[in-house]
Image: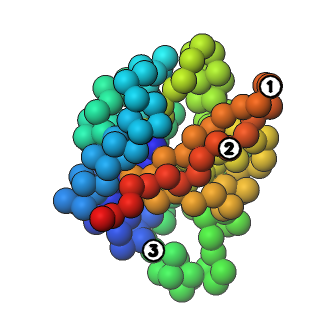
């Protein structure tokens, strides 16, 4: 589950370590995500619930009706010097820049993010049951790519809106995507 909307996510500012709170819309998205999750699972408990320590993720989890343990590995991709900047702002200095194709000065490499995702996935697989992870957009997209055995930059192919849920499953031991970017519909 991706955290609900923040002022920075709504304006496209890259947010890793800055602890930005949810907007009112983000709080509503978090509650909606909890209802989508309940629709998928009913009252069935998770074998493991983990969240990023960032306030936006912790608050999203609580508003969605979860009580996860904090796990530092679920933090967002460290954007380094690009923290708080938008892609158009970064492209003024680095034409064609994307998080998927270019380095993050002072931040993490795609390989470092993939290694964290692999470690989280190993923990999830060892949980002997369904797991819920509450985190951030880019990291969760890398996690999805790594679940499928793809390199971190393949995360560009998966949408994950604020408050969105992606369900990773398996078929006879082979990783698959069961649902991608589930969000509550308005109305």
Which-is-in-front pick, marks 2 and 3?
2
Q: Secondary structure at mark 3?
A: loop
Image vertical order of residue 119 relative to residue 149, above or below:
above
Q: Earlier in the sequence, mark 2 or mark 3?
A: 3
Q: Is residue 21 left or right of residue 142?
A: left
Q: Residues within 10 Å of mark 3 (few under 14, many from 20)?
A: some
Q: Which residue is mark 1?
A: 172
- One can see residue 83 in this view: no
Residue drawn at the location 59% of the way across and 24% of the way down:
124
Residue drawn at the location 54% of the way across and 86% of the way down:
92
Q: Depth check: 98 or 162 in front?
A: 162
Q: Is residue 56 left or right of residue 172?
A: left
Q: Residues within 10 Å of mark 2 (few under 14, many from 20)?
A: some
Which-is-in-front pick, marks 3 and 1?
1
The CA span between labels 2 and 3 is: 29 Å
Image vertical order of residue 6 relative to residue 1, above or below:
below
Labelled disc at residue 177: 2
Q: Which residue is mark 3?
A: 86
Residue 152, percent across and down?
70, 50
Q: Earlier in the sequence, mark 2 or mark 1?
A: 1
Residue 67, percent across and down?
31, 26
């Amino acid at each position: 589950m991706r955290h609900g909307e923040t002022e920075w996510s709504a304006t496209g500012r890259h947010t890793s370590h800055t602890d930005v709170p949810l907007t009112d819309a983000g709080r509503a998205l978090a509650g909606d995500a909890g209802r989508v999750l309940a629709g998928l699972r009913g009252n069935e408990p998770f074998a493991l619930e983990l969240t990023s320590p960032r306030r936006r993720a912790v608050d999203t989890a609580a508003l969605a009706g979860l009580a996860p343990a904090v796990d530092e590995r679920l933090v967002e991709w460290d954007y380094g010097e690009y923290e708080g900047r938008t892609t158009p702002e970064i492209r003024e200095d680095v034409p064609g820049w994307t998080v998927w194709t270019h380095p993050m000065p002072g931040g993490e490499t795609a390989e470092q993010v993939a290694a964290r995702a692999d470690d989280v996935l190993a923990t999830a697989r060892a949980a002997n049951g369904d797991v819920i992870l509450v985190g951030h957009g880019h990291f969760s997209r890398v996690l999805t790519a790594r679940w499928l055995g793809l390199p971190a930059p393949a995360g560009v192919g998966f949408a994950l809106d604020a408050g969105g849920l992606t369900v990773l499953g398996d078929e006879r031991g082979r990783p698959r995507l069961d649902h991608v970017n589930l969000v509550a519909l308005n109305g």
